[in-house]
Image (cartoon, rainbow, N blue to C red):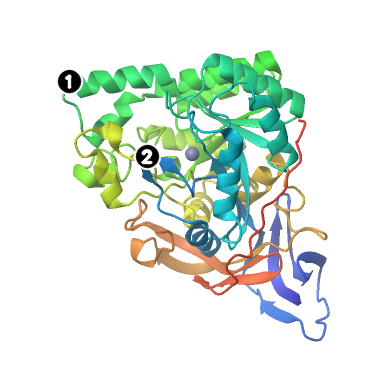
Amino acid sequence: MSLLIRNGEIVNVGSRIKGDVFVENETITQIGQNLEVPRGAEVVDATGKLVFPGFIDPHVHIYLPFMATFAKDTHETASIAALVGGTTTYIEMCCPNRNDDALEGYQLWKSKADGKSACDYAFHMSVTKFVNETESQLREIVADGTASFKIFLAYKNFFGVDDGEMYQTLELAKKLGVIVTAHCENAELVARLQQKLLTEAKTGPEWHEPSRPESVEAEGTGRFATFLENTGATGYVVHLSCEKALDAALAAKARGVHIFVESVLPHFLLDKTYAERPGVEGMKHVMSPPLRAKQNQTVLWNALAEGSIDTVGTDHCPFDTEQKLLGKTAFTNIPNGIPGIEERVNLLYTHGVKRGRLSLDRFVDAASTRPAKLFGLFPRKGTIAVGSDADLVVYDTNYRGVVSAKSQHTNNDYNGFEGMEIDGRPSIVTVRGKIQVRDGKFVGERGRGKLLRREPSHF
Ligand SMILES: [Zn+2]
């Protein structure tokens, strides 16, 4: 099986060249100008188009029992949505809760993906308690190729860890050379503020943001950083949403703490007025940390442009209208999540690169190369280079369209970004050399995706 992608503009971080990419079997074997077409090779004409390394979403939820229900996607639906949108690898949060056995949870999450995903995938292993068997279980999981952890400072008594458990997790992560991702909100303050608001009969989705204000996220971010500082571990703040939390992360970075920052698509494009819409419209826009006051968006775009926000993920987590309505009498029961696995690349390209907020370089870096580097996938993923996996996105910058639930592949009955313009979309998407998408349609092989083994990064 061979494939020649001809005459495109090949974009890597730090370089843009016009040329051809030749793929044999699953791997890029040649990059150059006017490459010969071997007999039997399939040829894709990329004239006038950009050729990107396959995009990587470092933060998604697919199988997820949460808030008395289950997220709607399967690996089949989520991977097709990802691919249509140009994402060829995702990293799913494996999230057993405090009552579950970690190793059993890990096996369960793996079984849900096995043979189902059309794109490649990996896991972050959540540590939701630290008990006698935790260390040996985590060592086994890391040895199995899952070399990153996730902790929640929020979600008290469910996913959340206390400070002691956070310390133990970071200490072990430091020993193993494993990066720890963290949801940074103060669980105690969230629980108290939620109770206070409900007691005052403030039950609608517009009260979700006031129950977890910016200061609560800034405290979580700062505390996580302080624990990194005192254990020497390397950390990654997931879905950072606001200026105050960014300040806490950057202050830590400035004093030498090994801390990286992810923000997610909704926080760049949606503000808290979306969650203030009446009834279910507001509920659709409930996630945590919540959508913030609009002025934070400029701060996030600028930080992304200069690289102090490292990556852009989605926190993809679809709950449909009926599930969102579980919270109709109390915002605390609204399942959290604004899905975006299919929209991330196109909306970031449109509202970032095309609108002049983001260089093409930083776009590729934040959505592909840097996640690959941080999570032990580089140079297999995240770059167009000889020897790398042939995950390629031929991108049509002349396409014009609008985001709509009617045309989405995610298993959900609405889209949080409904009506937003997109200026560009993938015309061809390959996973290890096989064409999986043509012009917005999945045309590939279901179940092609592989679990990617990752080694500890030892930053
Ligand atoms: Zn998440």
Q: Residue 12, how many percent across, how many down?
A: 71, 54
Which residue appears farthest toward the bottom when viewing the image? Answer: 39
Q: Nearer the viewer, residue 34 or 171?
A: 171
Label of residue 336 in the image: 2
Give the residue at the far left of this rendering: 201
Q: Residue 420, how many percent across, how many down? A: 37, 56
Indicate left or right for 253 with 324 as reference. right
Left or right, 72 with respect to 436, comes to left
Asked if one can make out residue 379 in the rendered structure from this viewpoint, the answer is yes
Find residue 7 and report its horizontal and vertical position in percent: 71, 73
| Amino acid type of the residue tagged 2 in the rendering | Asn
Residue 158: quadrant of the picture: top left
* Crowd class of label 1 (few under 14; some 14 to 19; many from 20; radius 10 Å): few
Helix, strand or loop at mark 1: loop
Position in image of residue 125 (x %, y %): 60, 37
Q: Residue at x 43, y 37 (%)?
A: 297
Tell me the element at label 2. loop
Q: CA distance from mark 2 to mark 1?
A: 22 Å
For image coordinates 77% across by 31% down, the residue present is 458
Residue linked to disc 1: 200
Q: Quadrant of the C terminus?
A: top right
Circle 1: residue type: Glu
Q: Quadrant of the N terminus?
A: bottom right
First-in-chain label (2 vs 1): 1
Q: Quadrant of residue 118?
A: bottom right
